[in-house]
Amino acid sequence: MDEVAWFAGVATCIKILLIPSYRSTDFEVHRHWLALTHSLPLSNWYSDRTSPWTLDYPPLFAFFEYFLSLPASLIDPTIVNLTQGLNYSADSVVLFQRFSVILSDFMLVFAIYRLTKDLPSSLRGLVCIAILWSPSLFIVDHVHFQYNGFLLGILMLSLSFLREGRDFIGGLFFAVLLCFKHLFAVAAPVYFVYLLRHYCWGKYWIWRFLMLGLMLVSVLSVAFGPFIYYGQMKQVIQQLFPFDRGLCHAYWAPNFWTLYIIADKGIGFILRRLGLNVPAPTASFTGGLVGASPPFAILPKVTPLATFLLVLLSLSPCLVKAWKQPKPDHIIRWVSYAYTCGFLFGWHVHEKASMHFVIPLGFVAVSSLEDAAHYNLLSVVSCYSQFPLLFETKEYPVKVVLLLLHSFLMWSSFSLQFGKYASGKKANDAKSEQGCGERIRLIGKMGRIYLLGLLVIEVWGQFLHTYLLGDKLPFVPLMLVSVYCSFGMVYSWGFQLKMILRCT
Amino acid sequence: MEGKGKEERNPTKKSDRVVVWLLHRKFTLLSILLFAFFLRILVSLHPYSGARRPPMFGDYEAQRHWMEITINIPPREWYKNTTFNHLAYWGLDYPPLTAYQSYFHGIFLRALDPNSVALSSSRGYETPLSKLLMRWTVLSSDALVFFPAALYFVIVYYAGRKDDEVAWQLAMILLLPGVILIDHGHFQYNCISLGLTIGAVAAIISENDVLASVLYCLALNHKQMSAYYAPAFFGHLLGKCIRRKNPLLETMKLGFVVFGTFIIVWWPYLSSVEAILEVLRRLAPFERGIYEDYVANFWCSTSFVIKWKRLFSMQTLRLLSFGATLASILPSTVHQISVPSRQGFLYAMLNSSFSFYLFSFQVHEKSVLLPLVAMSLLALEEPLLFHWFSCYAMLSMYPLLCRDGLVVPYGALLLLSNLLYFTPQVFGGHRRRERVSFGFRKVLMALCLLSFLVIHVIYLSVTPPKRYPFIFEAFIMVLCFSQFVVIAAYTNMKQWMLQSSCFPKEKMH
C-alpha cells in the first residue's frame, strides 16, 4: 500500500497543479450533465435538448453525474442550473469538476493496489509508473477533461478479481462498467468466452450459467429499469448508438482505417497520373451520412457491419485461445488485445480509446523484457497520438515535457529492473561482477528509428510546416501524426497477437 | 606509485571522474531535472502577483516594466528619474545585472510581441502571448542557471555518497516549493541569484576560489539580497587564504577578482561618483520602515510587546538592527575564519542568512528563501530540520501567496514536498528515521504540526474579527518566528560543534 499510495499522491499533486490548464468542450458537456440530471426528472434525461451536449453515456454514468450534482448544488447552485449554468466557468465550477475527476481517479488507484498486492515491490513500482503516472491519463482526464481514470479503474478492478479467480465479482464489475460506458463492450466476447469456460464449465454449469445471466440482467435492470419504466428506451438507444456518424472522428484516430484511406488516396492518385479516369473523392470521412456518397475512389466502401465483422475476425484467435486454456494469468492480455482490435478496426473510433488497452497493458509490461520493450514504444505512440487534443501554446511545454519525463522514467526503471534480472540470471558469470552496469537494449534499432521519426513529424508539424508552406495544406500535420502513429498501433496489434499465440 | 598518488589529487582527473559519474547515473538525474522543470511549467500556469490589478499591478509588472525601460532608454538613465522613466512607477531597484538580464529578456519579448515592451504604452500589458513569453523567460533562466548550479553542487559536495542519496539531495534542492512558487507563481527571478550563489558554493568546494568569487559577485550584482551570504563567503575565503603559503598574495588575488567583476558590471555607471551614488540610493531602501507587512523576523514578531516604530527614531532603529545583525552573524563568521571547513561553510551560509532574515532592516517575507536554499544544501545531513524549516518557510509566505491567488499550487507543492521527503526507500528514497526520544519533544512537535495544519484552514475559511483584521497573519508570523529562532539557534550551535577535520588536510599548506 505504501508505494501505491506514494505514487498516487505524487500524481494527485500534478493533477492539482493542472487545474488552471486548458479545458475542452467536454468540460461543459459534463457540467451540463450535472445540471441536466439535477434539475430534470429522470424521464427527461435522454430527451432534453437545452444544450447541444445531450446525454450520450449509459444510465449508470448519468446516475454518477446525479450523485456529483448533489455536492455541486451546495457549493454553487449556478453549476447545476440548466439555463444559467450554460458555459459557466467561475472558479467554483472549475475547482469542483477538476476535483471530481481527481477524487474519482482513486478508483484506479484502488484497482492497481488490488492488482499488484502480490507483486514484489519493485515491480509494483513499475506498474504504478506505467499506469498511475501515465501521461495519456493526465492529458485526457486532467487537461482535456474526462473521467477515464475512474472508468478504467472499474475495468482494472474487474480484471484484478478475475486474476484472483473470483470470476463472478469480476464479471459483475464488467457489467457495471458497461452500464457506465458502453464503448467498453468490445471486450465482452472475451469475457463471455472466458467466464463460460473458466467459471461455468464443470458439474454445475447450468446453475453457474444462470447465476451469471441473473447477475447481468439485474445490473442491466438497475441501470436501464427506470428508463424502461418511463418508456424512454428508444431515446436512450438513439443517444447511445449514433450510427449516423462517419467512419473516422474529426481527428483521425491512428488506426487501420487511417491507413486504408491513405492507401485509397494514394492508389487513386497514381491511377489518375497514369491517365485512368478515376473520380476524385468529394465527401469527407469525418462527418455526414455514410451511405450518402462514396468517399472511396478505388477501395471498397466500409460499412459499420464490415467493421464489426472485422473486429470479431481479428478477435477470433484470442477467443479460441481463451476457449482452449482459460487461465486467469492471461486474462489481462486477452482483454487488452480485444480493445486493441476494437481500436484498430472499429467504427468512428476516438484517439482517446487507445487508453483502453494501453492502461491494462501497463500491468502486462512487467512480465517480460519483450513486453516491457513493446510497452515502452506503445505508450509513447499512444500519448503522442493524443497531442493534438491540446493545441494551445500554453500547454505545449506541458505535454512535451510530460511525455519526455514519462518515457525517461519508464525507460530507465524498466532497464534497471530487467538489467537486474539479466545479471541475476548470470550470477555465476564473471561478467556479472559489474552488476547493473551492463546495459540491456530495451528498444531495438527499428524502434529507435521509429521514435526518431516521431520527433521529425513533431518538428515538421509545429515549426517547419507553417514556415515552409505557410497556410497551404493545413490538415497535413495532423494527418501525418495519425498516419505515422497508426503504424505503431498496427505493430502493437501484431505484437500482442504474436504474444497471445505463443504464450497463452 | 608516487606519480599515481599525485594524479589522483589532480583536479582534471577529478573532473573526469565527475563525467563518468554523470554518465553512470544520467537517467535518474535527468529524470529529476525534467521533473523539476515540469513542475515549474505547471506552476507557471497559475496566476502571478498583481494580475489584472491596476494601477500598480505587482512583481510581474515590475519585471515587465524593467524590460520596457532597459531596451528603450540608454543604460545611464536606467536608475534616473526622467520623462520616460518615472521611478515612482516600479523604478529599477536591483543592481545592474538584473537590469542587463531585463535587457536581454526585453529583446526576446520585443522580437515576438513588440507591444508588450513598447515605451510608456505597455503599462499593465497582459495578453496570453506576453504572459507566456514572460513565464518562459523565468523558466529558461531557471533551467540555465539554477539547474546546472544545483547539479554541480551535488556532484562535488556529495561525491562520496550513495547514488540514491545524491539523487534525493538533488531533488530536495530543485524541488524547494518556496522557490518554485515565488519564481514561477508570484513572478521573480530569484533562480538567477540563488543559482549563481549555489554555483559559487560548488566552486568553493571544488577548490576553485577565483570562480567562486566571480560567481558570488555576479549573484550580489543580480540581487543585493545575496549579501545575506556575504559574511560566510568572506569568512570562509579569508580563513582559507590566511592558511595558504602567501596569505597576503592570495587575499589580494581574490580582492582583485572581486574588484574586477564589480568594475565590469558597473561599467556604465563609473563616469562619476554621483552616478554611482544614484544607483546605490535606488538599491538601499532605507526610507522604508524597519519591517513591512507581517514578516516572521525579530522586529516584527516582538512588536506586540515592544512598539519599535513608536519608541525609536528611524536612525536609531537602523543602528539597532545593524548591531543586532552584526552580533548574530559574528559567531559563525569567526568560526569560519578560524577553522574553515566545507561543511562549516554551508552552516555559516545558513546562519548568516538566518541572522539577516531575523534581525536586519527592511526584510521581506520572500527573503526567507535565502536561508531556505542554504538549508536545502544540507538536506542530506539534517533531513528532519530541513523539512521542518521548509514547511514553516512556506507557511511564512502563505498570506502573500494567498493574495496572489496561488493557494492551489501552494497546497499541491506542500503535499508533494512531503511525499518526496518520504520517498519509499525502494525507489531511491532516503528516509532517515529520526529518533524522538523525549516525550516532551514529541508532544511539542505534534503541537507545532497541529497548529501548522490548523492555521492553513482557519486562514482560508474564517473571517478575522473586525477589531483585529490581521490576527491570523500575526499568529502565522509568531508561529514561524518561534520555529525559525529555534532552528537558527540549533544550527549555530551545530556549526560550532563541527570538527575542523572535515576539511581535507592535503589542501592546507
Image (cartoon, coloured by chain):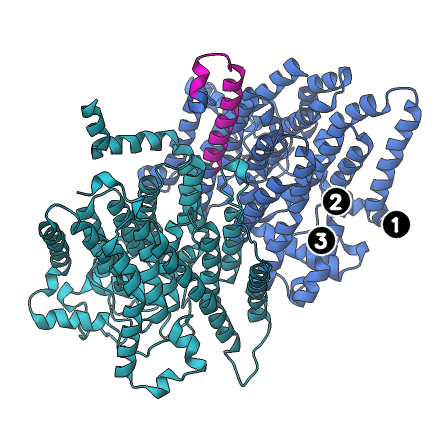
Chain colours: A blue, B cyan
In the image, is B229 to the left or to the right of A387? left
Counting from the top left corner in percent of width and height, residue B8 is at 24, 29
Q: Give neighbour class at mark 1: few <14, some 14-19, many 20+ (Cα, 10 Å).
A: few
Vertically, is A110 above or below B450?
above
Q: Is residue B360 magenta?
A: no
Instruction: Identify the image quadrant of residue B115.
Output: bottom left
Q: Earlier in the sequence, mark 1 or mark 2?
A: 2
Report, in whole angstroms, how far the alpha carbon at label 1 lies from the one at label 2: 16 Å
Q: Nearer the viewer, residue B439 or A293?
A: B439
Q: Earlier in the sequence, mark 3 or mark 1?
A: 3
SS at circle 3? helix
Point out the frontmost of discs 1 and 2.
Answer: 2
Counting from the top left corner in percent of width and height, residue B112 is at 29, 53
Vertically, is B350 above or below B3?
below
Q: Nearer the viewer, residue A486 or B280?
A: B280
Point out the frontmost of discs 2 and 3.
Answer: 3
Q: Nearer the viewer, residue A407 or B274?
A: B274
Q: If the image is split into quadrants, where does the C terminus of chain B sit?
A: top left
Report, in whole angstroms, how far the alpha carbon at label 3 lies from the one at label 1: 20 Å
SS at circle 2? loop
Q: Is residue A422 magenta?
A: yes
Does residue B54 appear in the picture of this structure?
no
Which residue is denoted by mark 3 in the rendering?
A65
Amino acid at circle 2: Pro
Residue stretch rendered in magenta on the structure: A406-434
In the image, is B45 to the left or to the right of A222? left
In the image, is A129 to the left or to the right of A336? left
Instruction: Identify the image quadrant of residue B355.
Output: bottom left
Q: Earlier in the sequence, mark 2 or mark 3?
A: 2
- Callouts 1 and 2 close, C-beta under 8 Å: no
